Amino acid sequence: MEKRLVLAIALSLLVLLSWSALAPKPQPIDNKVVTDNIQPAALTQNRASTSAPATIAAIVPADLARQTVKFTQDRREIVFDPAMAAITEVVFKDGLEHRLPLKIGFFSDNKQLFKQQTVTQNSISFIYEDQNERITKKYTIPNNSYTIDLEIITQNLSSFPLVFNPQLVLGRLDLSSKNPQSRYQDIFLGNKEKNMHLSAGKDTNNLDVKFLGLRDQYFCAIVEPADLAASAYTKKISPQESEVGLFMGETKIDPNAQIGHLYHIYLGPQDLNILNSIKPEWSGIIYFGTFDFIAQLLLQLLGFFYNLVHNWGIAIIILSIAVYFLLFPLSIKQMRSMKEMQVLQPKIEALRKELKDNPQRLNKEIMDLYKEHKVNPLGGCLPLLLQMPIFFALYQALIRSVALRGAHFLWIKDLSSPDKAFVFKHSIPLLGNQLNVLPILMAIGMFVQQKISMSKATGETAQQQQMMVIIMPIMFGVIFYQMPSGLVLYWFVNSLFMLIYQFRINIQK
């Protein structure tokens, strides 16, 4: 029965996690930005569009070439569309090498006729003007910081009052299957009551929003109006694209008057320490799903261990050892339960032969035997069941932790992805174009543990045990093969300690 439960757990793991192996993996950016100094005057000249959409949610054609302005800093390069005074994408550098596409980030008021006005070492501004109004958008972008301030000033040039409803697009999300980041994207917002994470693929409207954010696997964009009531929206503008933004309340501007709106913006990694140092409320964008609390705790522990040893691989090993000893009392009960089951196995085999034609009585006799010897047939699976929430939480934490991205350990170059000990020029059946050694070592260790913990049995039971000894390691090897190497390292170390303790028990027999 215990073997069947373990098999059921393994199958559940396979169903829940195999999509990670099949889903497209994030690819590195095509070209690394190497310019470290601000280049405010660097322009890429293309045909600029002068057509304005009917609404903010209207689609800007993806194939329409536009003029861009690249604002380059030490940590990132921000690409602007000057005609829209909007951010098209942010390219992160400093070893992170990641693109965060916003497409029309901070586009406002349906205006696509802006012109670049001024540019300094830490700011860039754009201006739009017609016979009725003048709009100035100024981005203040400090170097060596992930924060931005956006000030939008609207002046009434007409002789009559202007009434309008300010809107601000945070960005657009590509939900297509071709986008390797689509499965990581979601929406984050905070209101007076609580923070929420929403699906990017549904239309939503939320009132009294304090701040709004969107994110991909590692990076995020957050905007918060300063002293301004706002509501947030998510709108699907096509089957494969959603727009996220803010609506502000109705505003009236008298003739020859002006009004200004200020927005605080964060464009950077999902790093708890960085977000807490800027605004702790924004750190809620770091979310790991159902087991978020456990994942956050594990990341805190990992960070603590990392500060001690200064290596993420060793920190994961220490975490695995800590969890092992935390569950050690249950592990002892598991081992003892397995040992007692082995002692009872001859008696159970005798009952199977004696009562093979009476299955109901056979089950009753076996249960009575368990009660007589105070053996719980499911007790051996309890540590494994308790490991599952930790496993899933750590999985989510590792694949989303920007701190572990590119973290080295032994031959592993990135603990947030498979270990890729060997990379081949051509794809190999079952393995693909890479050989991940750590899952194979884990499967071998599991095979040895299964082999030495086998009970003495005959007949059908012995055949089932022999099958499980082979099937279980292969199944877990397949499940873990495309898992983040940090997660496989954690499980491998835990299994290694279980194996060592099993050897000790066998020696004491």
Image (tube, rainbow, N blue to C red):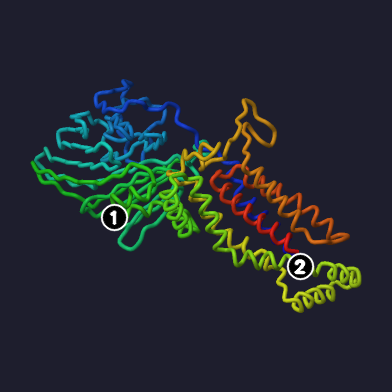
Residue visible at 49% across and 39% down in the picture = 408
Q: Which residue is mark 2?
A: 341
Residue visible at 62% across and 33% down in the picture = 434
x and y percent of residue 366 in the render? Answer: 80, 73
Please tell me which residue lies in front, 209 or 268: 268
| Residue 240 appears in the rendering | no
Q: Residues within 10 Å of mark 1 (few under 14, many from 20)?
A: many
Q: Residues within 10 Å of mark 2 (few under 14, many from 20)?
A: many
Q: Is residue 490 left or right of residue 89?
A: right
Residue visible at 41% across and 31% down in the picture = 62
- Does dot 1 land on a helix, a strand or a loop? strand
x and y percent of residue 506 in the render? Answer: 73, 60
Residue type of the residue flagged with mark 1: Lys
Residue type of the residue flagged with mark 2: Met
Q: Is residue 32 left or right of residue 450?
A: left
Rendered-image quadrant of the C terminus: bottom right
Rendered-image quadrant of the N terminus: bottom right
| Residue 326 appears in the rendering | yes
Please tell me which residue lies in front, 437 or 317: 317
x and y percent of residue 377 in the render? Answer: 72, 69
- Residue 210, labelled with which disc? 1
Please tell me which residue lies in front, 114 or 183: 183
Q: Is residue 9 left or right of residue 414?
A: right
Looking at the image, is 5 positioned above or below residue 262?
below
Give the CA distance from mark 1 to mark 2.
59 Å
